[in-house]
Image: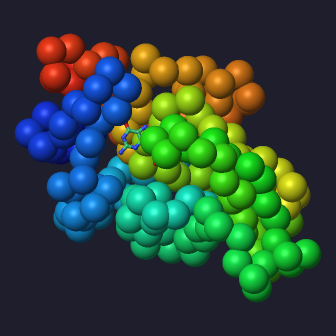
Amino acid sequence: MKLLKEKIMSEGLVLNDAILKVDSFLNHQIDPELMMEIGKEFHRRFSGCGITKIFTIESSGIACALPAGLCMHVPVVFARKQKSALMSSEAYSTKVYSFTKKVTSDVTVLKKFLPAGEKILIIDDFLANGEAALGLANIVQQAGSEVVGIGIVIEKSFQPGRQRLIDAGFRVESLARVQAFKDGKVIFAE
Ligand code: 5GP
């Protein structure tokens, strides 16, 4: 997606050999117009798939998933990273290791928002090792619903996430694929 790549090139900061910082338009400050274009692009790529719900993870996933939900006219559900006192037997949960925070957290969603028989599109901001997306897919499967696809805003193709998701049988659509970081610059895969 051209607009996204341009934004990454002009505002993305390569922090080290593994992390890209995009806090000026996605992870802290949010560019609503860019998010809207991202939503339209996910809608275009998954049109005709019969998606009934979008599933993401707090917090940055929400900004990317919401405009997609708006375009597809389906609800957006986000998994929480901390168990709340309200959630117990009424919730699905799984453990997800965070690539950026280097901690494992319980990722939880209330069962009532993820009934069986849904056709789910999983959306997240970044794909690195695939832990978050696989965790979300695990919850969808616990719920007895189908993962129709996984939509990623920024994929770091030099990390194993994409292959892990494909090996698990999922369709992966990434709007920007980063092949490498070179001299502090982002090199795109295509
Ligand atoms: P994974 O679970 O695929 O290993 O990593 C994806 C998750 O880690 C995303 O939800 C995102 O929050 C975070 N993440 C992974 N790589 C990056 C990165 O380069 N930059 C930022 N800002 N977040 C990342």
Residue 43, position as x, y percentages in the image: 44, 55
Which residue is more in the foreground, 154 or 88?
88
Q: Is residue 125 left or right of residue 31?
A: right
The image shows residue 172, relative to residue 122, as above or below, that is above
- Quarter that holds the C terminus: top left
- Quarter that holds the N terminus: top left
Residue found farthest to the bottom: 86
Rendered-image quarter of ligand 1: top left
Residue 13, position as x, y percentages in the image: 18, 37
Q: Residue at x 67, y 34 (%)?
A: 170
Residue 117 visible in the current orientation: no
Q: Is residue 130 left or right of residue 170?
A: left
The image shows residue 123, relative to residue 114, as above or below, that is above
Residue 57 visible in the current orientation: yes
Q: How many marks?
A: 0
Q: Residue at x 54, y 40 (%)?
A: 102
Q: Residue at x 43, y 17 (%)?
A: 158
